Image (cartoon, rainbow, N blue to C red):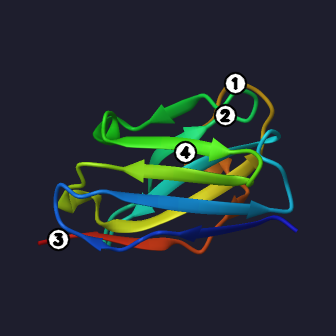
Amino acid sequence: QVQLVESGGDLVQPGGSLRLSCAASGFTLDYYAIGWFRQAPGKEREGVSCISSSDGRTFYVDSVKGRFTMSRDIAKNTVYLQMNSLKPEDTAVYYCASVPLRGYVCYLTGTEYDYWGQGTQVTVSS
């Protein structure tokens, strides 16, 4: 069955970096779009970035553009989120999600996704 497992969350100082991983099983990345989402305490879930299935095209929410980079390793069936210049407002539980979607688009809206991981905590604090 489809499974997503996130890892890499940690406590980091402002300005620091982290790389999150999302290991996928039960499907292959060239047939599924993948999204990264986050949810901070008391706030709604927010789409952070996504990657299309056909060509690995990436999309980002404005607040992380230039700081976060999403990528994938087809051979490892794993998606990554490299987060640089982290800010306290990046503190949240980060989730990856997947949906069967062939093509060159993906979505930053959580309701478009069928499968979710358990999340990994990212805390940015001095």
Comes first in the chain, label 1 or label 3: 1
| Residue 14 picture quarter | bottom left
Comes first in the chain, label 3 or label 2: 2
| Numbered disc 2: secondary structure | loop
Q: Position of residue 123 (x, y in %)?
A: 28, 71
Mark nearer the viewer, 4 or 2? 2
For marks 4 and 2, give the CA distance.
14 Å
Comes first in the chain, label 4 or label 3: 4
Report the residue at 61% width, 38% height from top. Answer: 51
Q: Tags 2 and 1 in contact by the CB under 8 Å rule? A: yes
Residue 125's disc number: 3
Task: Point out the image quarter for the N terminus.
Answer: bottom right
Rate crowding at label 1 as few (under 14), some (14 to 19) or many (20 or more) other CA atoms within 10 Å.
some
What residue did someone put label 4 on? 109
Report the residue at 29% width, 65% height from top. Answer: 91
Amino acid type, mark 4: Thr
Comes first in the chain, label 2 or label 1: 2
Amino acid type, mark 3: Ser
| Residue 88 picture quarter | bottom left
Amino acid type, mark 2: Ser
Residue 110 seen in the figure: no
Amino acid type, mark 1: Tyr
Q: Tags 4 and 2 in contact by the CB under 8 Å rule? A: no
State how many labels appear. Answer: 4
For marks 2 and 1, give the CA distance.
5 Å
What residue did someone put label 1 on? 104
For marks 1 and 4, give the CA distance.
16 Å
Rate crowding at label 2 as few (under 14), some (14 to 19) or many (20 or more) other CA atoms within 10 Å.
many
What residue did someone put label 2 on? 52
From the viewer's perspective, is 22 left or right of 74?
left
Mark nearer the viewer, 4 or 3? 3
Q: Nearer the viewer, residue 1 or 15?
A: 15
